[in-house]
Image: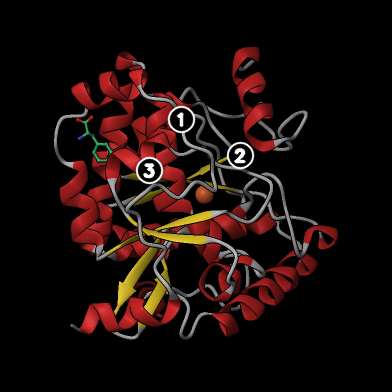
Amino acid sequence: MKPVVFFNSLAEKSGAVMPRGDYSTASDDYVVAQQWDVYTAEQHALWRRLYQRQAKLLPGRACDSYVEHLAHIDAAEGIPNLAAVSEALFRATGWRLVAVPGLVPDKVFFAHLAARRFPVTVWLRTPEEFDYIVEPDIFHDFFGHVPLLFDPVFAAHLQEYGKGGLKALTLGGLDFLARLYWYTMEFGLVKSSKGLRAYGAGILSSVGELDYCLNDQAPHRIRFELERVMRTRYKIDAYQKTYFVIDDFQQLFDDTTPDFTLLYQRLKTLSALSADSLLPGETNLSLANASLDDDG
Ligand code: PHE
Ligand code: FE
């Protein structure tokens, strides 16, 4: 029986009353068997529809590395067999995929990442949730997160994030680190020579936000700055008010390498910023000059 405390924080995180996955067979690290044979033909067909709709939106919106690695993963025809992809991933970057029933406690999540294991939820949304789902399912976890695990710099960063998470638990830094994850791994934008591109999984797996984050006039797009990101609140149930833009994954890796101990101390003395704040001196990167800027 998994702890009730976990389900409370999970409910806050996902908006769900109880997570829908079956946690009864999970081991201490929350790993389960995927049971790939149990998916129905209807579920594979639903996956194909999700995949095809999203794949059409990727050109000109997803970052090059994502598009390149997704193309090498055999996942277009149905729900992927995690063990098979895990083997290919291990050969590429030393990461493995592990199957989980759904969201897992923070400490378990961080420990997996620190050991180069990425947890992927086993269940797929229902047809009624084709457009939107509250809890992450296998489509979000796999389509959104897995392709970039084949990118060596991205993969190295995510392992460091996992180690940093375990450390943050002892330093009271969890809320700050969660904001970093949200605005990078889930909703991050990156520059390219052709303009801004998405690399965050929450965007890449969303039918509406993938275009919105790049082409709508409403949200702010601000150059990534570590402390700024870690002060900024976020909404989990609406399109983002602000996207933070990195130059490349090397910048993300380098900027997050320093010891966060003193940074957490300072952050605790600063007030949080609302999701839509724009501070004096901050530039809201316009769509046009974002690409000019990059070439210059
Ligand atoms: N450098 C961070 C620390 O000292 C760890 C970390 C690395 C956090 C990468 C996030 C991403 O705590
Ligand atoms: Fe995610």
Q: x%, y% of residue 146?
A: 43, 60
Q: Nearer the viewer, residue 194 or 89?
A: 194
Q: Earlier in the sequence, mark 2 or mark 1?
A: 2
Residue 195: image x %, image y %? 37, 80
The quadrant of the rendering that contains the N terminus is: top right
First in sequence: mark 3 or mark 1?
3
Disc nearest the viewer among 2 and 1? 1
190 vs 74, nearest the viewer: 190
Q: Residue at x 62, y 48 (%)?
A: 136
Numbered label attached to residue 229:
3
Give residue 231's position: percent from left, percent from top.
40, 35
Tell me the kind of residue under disc 1.
Ala
**Which three-letter amino acid code belongs to the residue tagged 3?**
Val
Beta carbon at label 2 within 8 Å of ligand 2: no
What secondary structure is found at the residue carrying circle 2? loop
Which image quadrant: the C terminus?
bottom left
- Which of discs 3 and 1 lies nearer the camera? The answer is 1
Colour setup of the view = secondary structure
